[in-house]
Each structure stands twice: as C-alpha cells, then as structure tokens.
Amino acid sequence: MYPTSYSHGWQVCRNCHAPNMLVTRHDNWHLRANPGYWGDSKPEVLILGFSKGANQLQASESGTFDRVAFAKARVRLGKILDVMGVSLHGQTLDQALTASGKGIGVASLIRCGISLDKHDKLITSGPVMVKAMSDKWSRDVMERCVRSHLLSHMPSSVQRILLLGNADEYVLRVKKLMASVFVDYRDLNKMSFTAIGRTWIFSAHPAGGNGHFNEWAEGDASTGQGYKRWLAQSAFGMAA
C-alpha cells in the first residue's frame, strides 16, 4: 500500500488529503501534500524530525529533492549524529541523504509539511511542535502518519530511531502518543523509550532557532541540556 515509504524521493501517500488537494486546511492549520523520504531504504538508524520547516518547504519548491531534508541545518544535524555516535559509513551527510546513501534514513513524524497560520503568517517551528500535539486535528494527522509509516512499514534493518526535539512538553506528548499506538511501548528514561523492538531516542533539534543546541552538544552532563544529552547517549548505548 505504501511502496515508497522508505524509498528515497517524494511519496505517494495522500491519507490526509482529498483527491487532487495540494493543501488541506483545518481551522488555522495548513497541511501540504509533500511527504518525502531521504537516504538508505534499509537504514540502521532512522532520523525523524517533526515536519518540514520553512527552509525545507522553500527548498522543496526548487525542485531539487536531495537538498530538501534539513536545508540550512545539516551542519548541526551532522553534529548531533557525531555526538550520538551515528556512523555515516565514510560518507558526508550530503551523500548519505541521497538515493545511494548508506546507514541512515530521514523523514518526519508528520511526513507532509504542517504549519500554523498566525496573523497571516505560516509558522512551522518553535511552539508549533507542542501546539500540534495538543490540537486534536493535528494530533490525529500525526497518529495517522505513525500508524501508516512506523507501525506497519518500518524496515527490519532499523535498530534505533532518533527523534529530533527534546523540549519536555514535546517529549511527554510524543511519548503519550506512541504509548497509545505501540502495544509493547516501554519507557526507558526521560529521553527514550522502546517500541516494536527498537530504541527511540530524543535529541536536540538542529534548527538554527534552537538556542540550547550548543549546551546540548557540549554542556555539563550533570544538568540541563547536557544531562538530556547524557540520557540520550545512555539509551543509544554510548555513555560511559
């Protein structure tokens, strides 16, 4: 039913859209029908953002698919992967996010691009992540995505899932959603859980607007974002 869920490129899924609709609107929410997947079709590590941010949406309009995932945030994403010990198998990150990439795959919890209309401006980041988890319509969109692409169609090669974004409220709400979907859900620590035989870990988000990024990557592991990093590394099997 979803032949391209884990094949590099734009996807055919239109579960959340009426036929021939490019954008679905509900109240102040906008959902663009542009689901995609980047990288290895049989990844060891699956990396999931929340949805496409403004830079990714802009890049998607250029027609160059390989440049869309984490546009203008790849340096930080590379730092996250390095901190977490994710191997790129000798590739650059740019190479890994192509059809010939090995080891990692990239998508989003909401594979289409979701945004919130605020004073006639479409917002795609920051508080939108938490708002989307508390609004019934957008949460239903996310649950539909999780059931369609993660519950039933995840490649057996995937060992770990890296969830980008570690704000406390966001983590709690995502965990609650996952616990309602996966019957074998089990909490590990504040930054991780297990489900469908895999370990799911929350890390910092690489967006330029994340002012806590350097603290997460390099801060004292006993407190704050540094402690969240340590918890994530522990779940990933890295911490000493």
Image (tube, rainbow, N blue to C red):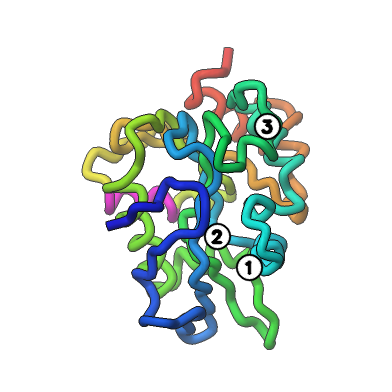
Q: Which mark is residue 133?
A: none
Relative image position of residue 131 (x, y in whole percent): 53, 68
Looking at the image, is mark 3 or mark 2 nearer the viewer?
2
- Give the CA separation, mark 1 to mark 2: 8 Å
Would residue 38 appear left or right of 144 to someone viewing this image? right
Badge 3 density bin: few <14, some 14–19, many ≥20, Cα 10 Å? many
Q: Which mark is residue 124?
A: 1
Q: Residue at x 61, y 41 (%)?
A: 97
Numbered range of the magenta stretch: 173-181
Q: Residue at x 41, y 29 (%)?
A: 159
Q: Quadrant of the image for the C terminus?
A: top right
Return the residue at label 2.
51
Q: Residue furthest left?
A: 183
Return the residue at label 3.
226
Q: Quadrant of residue 61?
A: bottom right
Decide which of tag 3 and tag 1 comes sooner along the chain.
1
Looking at the image, is mark 3 or mark 1 nearer the viewer?
1
Kindly indicate whether the residue at mark 2 contacts the one at mark 3 (C-beta within 8 angstroms): no
Would residue 220 appear left or right of 2 to someone viewing this image? right
Question: Could you tell me the amino acid type at mark 3?
Answer: Gly
Tell me: residue 100, above or below residue 51: above
Q: Residue 23: say if magenta.
A: no
